[in-house]
Amino acid sequence: MKKYTLLLLALLCILISCKRECFVGVEKNVDFFNNTADVIEGHLLSVDVMGPSEIAIDDTLLIFSTNDPTGYIKIYNIDNCKLIGKYGLKGRANNEFNMTLLASSNIAKTNKGSIVYIYDDLSLLKVMNIDLTIQHNIAIIDTAYRSISLIDGVTIFDFVNDVSFTYTKVHEDNVFLGRYNLPQYSYKAHNQDAEDIVVFSKLMNFEDVDDACYSYSGAVYKHPIRNIYYQPFQYMDYLLIFNMEDNTIRATHQNNSLSFNDKIPDNANSFCFGHSCNTNEYIMCLYFNGDYSKKSLKNEGEEKPELLIFDWSGNYLGGVKLGREIHRIAYDSRTQSLIGVNIDKESVYAFDLSGMIKSISVE
């Protein structure tokens, strides 16, 4: 396997020797902490969905993965909140599921229609054709992939372009108990060998090494069309962006917060980035480490997040405070609305982002 190395050092670019055009690694310090606009309250949508787990949007379609065995995938009309259908019964057939999780809030477009990636169990990824599913009133599965287990990490497949990106979580060494291995990243294009991307040169210095599993954790997402991936960290104020088109890896870091070069005190982990969605222009992330979220939890019993918006180079563009506690998000580009789901309450909200989008848009 070809190997590349990136050291995360502040304001430092590194050219790395490799067999093809080299990666450039860049870290920038920005200020997004307590730096968002006023509260957008949002309004409740009349969507009756049982046990929602993930959400996606395809034009006028609002798509949920759920824990409902009578139809794990539910599709609604986003404009009138009417149920179009529920698909995927419990079972072991190709078009049945044992559990479901949408792998992304993005919908891919093919010459056969729109497709969505759905996890069935923790390591089988099925590709469902949305248009044919609605047309035939039964889940239509185009193909399926076996991926790394969600317990161990995640593989992002791009069925259209035949590429994949894999992230393996920090894990305890099988031989040396108490020793933890670094997170691993790899990229595979077409029929080529997978390429290792070694982001971190060594494990951070922890007072309690068990904290390593938390500090390096974070979901991985992909650009809707382009071959760019990113990872907001759950317990560090970091956003990593992997641009596989120009061989650039960028790290966006909150100024003066803990870095991967610091010694991490015991119990220092605070929840930072939550769920994320994106558009061709923007990366949108729920954020919980600011004063707004902490005060709302203390005073109201609800951990209301902020929404941070970045461009695909990792520049912080702006953000808003959200007036509802939500855990999953998707973006409706037609109405410039953020759709948020509170998993615990099984409630769905819409937030008007048109003012924020207008303020950050580049003419």
Image (spheres, rainbow, N blue to C red):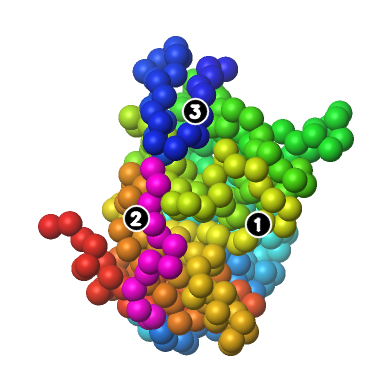
Question: Residue 251: x and y, percent?
Answer: 44, 41
- Secondary structure under badge 2? strand
Q: CA distance from mark 1 to mark 3?
A: 24 Å
The nearer-to-camera label among 1 and 3 is 1
Residue 272 visible in the current orientation: yes
Q: Nearer the viewer, residue 22 or 315?
A: 315
Residue 122 visible in the current orientation: no
193 is within the stretch colored magenta: no
Magenta-colored span: 28-40
Q: CA distance from mark 1 to mark 2?
A: 23 Å
Residue 41 located left or right of residue 122: left
- Secondary structure under badge 3? loop
Q: Residue drawn 50% across and 64% down? A: 287
Pointer 3 or 2: first along the chain: 3
Tell me the residue that label 2 is attached to: 316
Which amino acid type is marked by label 3? Leu
Which amino acid type is marked by label 1? Asn
Tell me the residue that label 1 is attached to: 269
Note whether 8 is above or below 300 in the view shown: above
Q: Residue drawn 64% across and 77% down? A: 344
The quadrant where residue 143 appears: top right
Category of crowding for the residue at label 3, using alpha-carbon neighbours closer than 10 angstroms: few (below 14), some (14–19), many (at least 20): many
Residue 342 located left or right of residue 158: right
